[in-house]
Amino acid sequence: MLNIPSLSIDSPDMRRAGRDLLSLALMDARNHTLHWMGQYETALGASHFAVPCAPELNPPLWELGHVGWFQEYWIGRNLQRQLGRRCDPSATRLASIEPQADRWWDSGQVAHDSRWALALPDVSSIKTYLLDTLESTLELLEKTPDEDDALYFYRLALFHEDMHGEALIYMAQTLGLALELKTPGPGTVREPLLLPATRWQLGSAGSSGFTFDNERAPHEVQVPEFEIDAQTVTWAQFVEFVDDSGYDRPELWQPEGWQWLQEKAADEGRRGPRYVDQIGVASGAVMQTRFGTARRMLGGQPVMHVSWWEADAWCRWAGRRLPAEVEWEVAAHNAGRRGFRWGDVWEWTGTTCQPYPGFSADPYRDYSEPWFGTHKVLRGASFATRDRMKNPRYRNFYLPGRDDIFVGFRSCAL
């Protein structure tokens, strides 16, 4: 493991980090990746990292190699890296230091289910590849101007690795691996917050620091007065929905959501959120498996591992609705001092992920553009998200049936 001094390398300010701090953060992200892979080695090394082929999983060795591949592809092999967002993604690249790298780890070309059939190198060889590509990245960074365009791909590689670091954690939850990680405890339940009508600028010009392409371009939105929960929905609130036969009442569910629920019920006997082993109608007790261990959830803890369909059904039952992403953003910026709390779990919004007006895809074309129209926007962050990824303007997005991530929701008045 690399020895890194304690600096502000894990804060939202990293979007504007200069060359020296960025170098430290890239090493920190790699340490983080290798730390969690060490947990996988302990749990799965004897089985050669075998995991089931499932839509929400990746083979751990593929996940590890892909992180190194992405960094090398956009930095070490990219002759236009200093152009930043103006880079031509189709321009000729240098060859990888690993001749098979593209065939193994190019996520745009290697279909998801085919990743289980790849003859990947062993973990030691992949770690060597990660070390060599990181050394190359840091050497190139030393010679890079301290300018936004020139630093764009270094910042992108940092945040990309942070995303995959969180993916390793929620994949461990799916696999039931024993991780030592503190999950959210109960919080203070406050009354909903009333926010006045406003005109709000969604999006950023991206003229200073780093922005993801789906966060651009800036445009004003008229936001009527709205009431929003100060915190995410708790287990105590969600149990009431279950007690009132919420999972057996099709009128509370959108047709696609009801179909999703019937499939889960047939396959898993599902009548509650994912990983829930017991949800007591009389007692209100909730037992949810966290990293392989069944734990009793306290009433004030945020409900977690719910799909968008479940969140929407709860809101219909409660006579409320999911917030629009602009409402969530307004509250995150303006109501923090009034008790608006976020960051324990990702939060579903009622918004389908679409480009902002004036959208232009960045060179990494597969980041957001292919998912517009099918995925729902999530806002906030989770307990497993690195602090430098926590930005109230960050737009996460998943299909509405995803419930393996650390996700909950809050509601707004109709």
Image: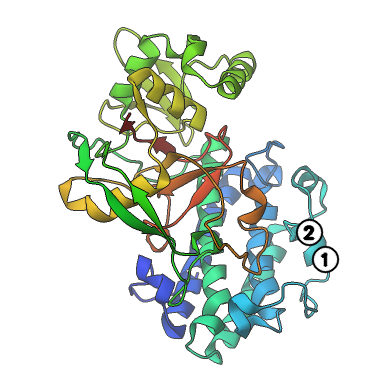
Q: What residue type is labelled 2?
A: Trp
Q: Is mark 2 on a helix, strand or loop?
A: helix
The answer, for residue 11, to whether it is visible in the render is no
Q: Looking at the image, do the residues carrying marks 2 and 1 touch, with CB atoms under 8 Å apart?
A: yes
Q: Residues within 10 Å of mark 2 (few under 14, many from 20)?
A: many
The location of residue 302, given as percent across then percent down, is: 33, 34
Residue at (33%, 47%) from the top-left corner?
A: 223
Q: Where is residue 367 in the image (x, y as percent from the top left)?
A: 62, 58
Q: How crowded is mark 1: few (under 14 residues within 10 Å), some or many (20 or more)?
A: few
Q: Which mark is residue 104?
A: 2
Q: Residue at x 43, y 53 (%)?
A: 385
11 and 360: which is toward the camera = 360
Q: Which amino acid does label 1 sit on?
A: Gln
Q: In this view, does 235 lie to the left or right of 94?
A: left
| 230 relative to 79, above or below | above
Q: How many marks?
A: 2
65 vs 278, left or right, is right
> What residue is shown at x 43% (from left), y 40% (from top)?
349
User: In front here: 306 or 365?
Assistant: 365
Q: How far apart are marks 2 and 1 (CA)?
A: 6 Å
Q: Where is residue 389 in the image (x, y as percent from the top left)?
A: 43, 60
Whether residue 357 can be seen here: yes
Residue 183 x %, y %: 36, 41
Tag 1's secondary structure?
loop
Q: Which of 371 and 38 is in front in this view?
A: 371
Q: Mark 1 points at which residue?
A: 100
Viewer-side residue, 160 vs 174: 160
